Amino acid sequence: MTWFDRLVSRVAPSRRYPPFSRSVALHGVGETHGRRRVRIALTASALMMCGLASASNPIVPGWYADPEIRVFGGRYWIYPTYSDHYGKPDVTSRFSAAQKPARQRKTVRPSYGMQTFFNAFSSPDLVHWTKHDHVFDVRNAGWAAYAIWAPSVIQANGRYYMFFSANDIQSDAELGGIGLAVSDRPGGPFKDAIGKPLVGAFHNGAQPIDPFAFRDHDGQVYLFYGGWKHCNVVRLSPDLKRILPFADGSTYKEVTPPGYVEGSFMIERKGVYYLMWSEGGWTGPDYSVAYATGPGPTGPFTPRGKILSQDLRIARGAGHHSVVNVPGTDDWYIAYHRRPLDTDRGEHRQIAIDRMVFAADGRIEPVVMTDAGVKPRPIGVQKPTRNSGRAM
């Protein structure tokens, strides 16, 4: 269904129209008189209609988790973990001779074996999403074989760099950790950039999973990561392929806040740095998001409490989020995964987007989970206000 069909269904849900192709829709050939009248009205008031339309949560079909939302080239992009099969299984077409024996290792959960790629989704307005299949696949990273999780994509040096978790290593004796892939486009294909994990061992007790790339005002890129209740931050080289020491000589700096489990994320707003993370068990109802604030990307951080947790009217297990700031505004949106009320399966997670609001003193207000979702928010378009159209 196209964006126009969705709008028509909202404007005139009682009318039924014969199916028509995209080419016919573009030229208006074969439309009924009623459909053409609706089309003309919608075309004339497209911007107004965008203000009335809204998305719905979940934003896309399928079982997906750990969504990272970014803005590239005037579009919103979401990169999630493929959590479980939904309908027809989505699979990697082939594995290398090295990957096949690696995939025979015992995994913590059977689903880890099917998590061998990333799909992505892009949108001009947070409402209408386009799927991009297999923007990364283990076919393009010979050392990675399964448990491909939680990508983080950042633009640098005219290209797009994806950090990702692979192989769910349980000790330093295993091959895996956080890898780096690169592409000329945000929609991939992303291919292995260094031929091995960037972080391939445990430091400060942190399992090398759940990376997040953060660029500070001075251009320095930091990588936050860590599972098993430990969070580290490292400095990256300008080409993002090496880890550099901090001024004090340390390399893997631990910044674990109380209650931290996994899924670290950072934003900066008005000189305040917000370190955010997930708490609780990812398969349970206690999964949630908390945050702390500090004067810089390495802290020290002061815990501020939870901002996202289950709502038994909406969904359970809400967590592993990311946040996007609409460029040129102080409008913020949170992308996260949550579990429907009618399933207890851990992998049955869906992506949702809701507003994230700051109080006057800089605190983050508790996020209100919704089924309705958000209204369209095109990049570069200012929201109308009560004074819109009046001389100031």
Image (tube, helix red, strand yellow):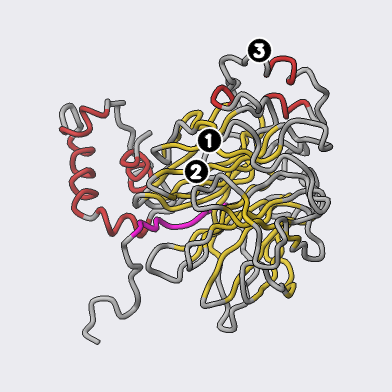
Image coordinates for residue 247, horizontal then vertical, percent:
65, 67
Q: How many marks?
A: 3
Residue 360 on the magenta segment? no
Residue found at x 29% / y 26%: 18
Kind of residue sitting beneath label 3? Ala
Describe residue 345's horizontal placement relative to residue 119 as left or right. Answer: right
The foreground one among 8 and 196 is: 196
Question: On the image, numbered disc 2 is attached to which residue?
Answer: 161
The foreground one among 180 and 1 is: 180
Within 10 Å of disc 3 (Cα), the crowding (few <14, some 14-19, many 20+) is few
Q: Earlier in the sequence, mark 2 or mark 1?
A: 2
Describe residue 269's horizontal placement relative to residue 130 as left or right. Answer: right
The foreground one among 76 and 5 is: 76
Image coordinates for residue 95, horizontal then vertical, percent:
62, 16
Residue found at x 58% / y 20%: 92
Q: CA distance from mark 2 to mark 1?
A: 9 Å
Q: Is residue 96 visible?
A: yes
Kind of residue sitting beneath label 2? Tyr
Mark 3 falls on what kind of element?
Answer: loop
Within 10 Å of disc 1 (Cα), the crowding (few <14, some 14-19, many 20+) is many
Mark 2 and mark 1 residues within 8 Å of each other at the beta carbon: yes
Image coordinates for residue 305, horizontal then vertical, percent:
74, 70
Mark 1 falls on what kind of element?
Answer: loop
Quadrant placement of the C terminus: bottom left
Q: Using the image, tell me which numbered label, if any, was put on residue 193.
A: 1
The foreground one among 142 and 273 is: 142
Quadrant placement of the N terminus: top left
Question: On the image, numbered disc 3 is attached to which residue?
Answer: 97
Residue found at x 33% / y 38%: 5
Kind of residue sitting beneath label 1? Ala
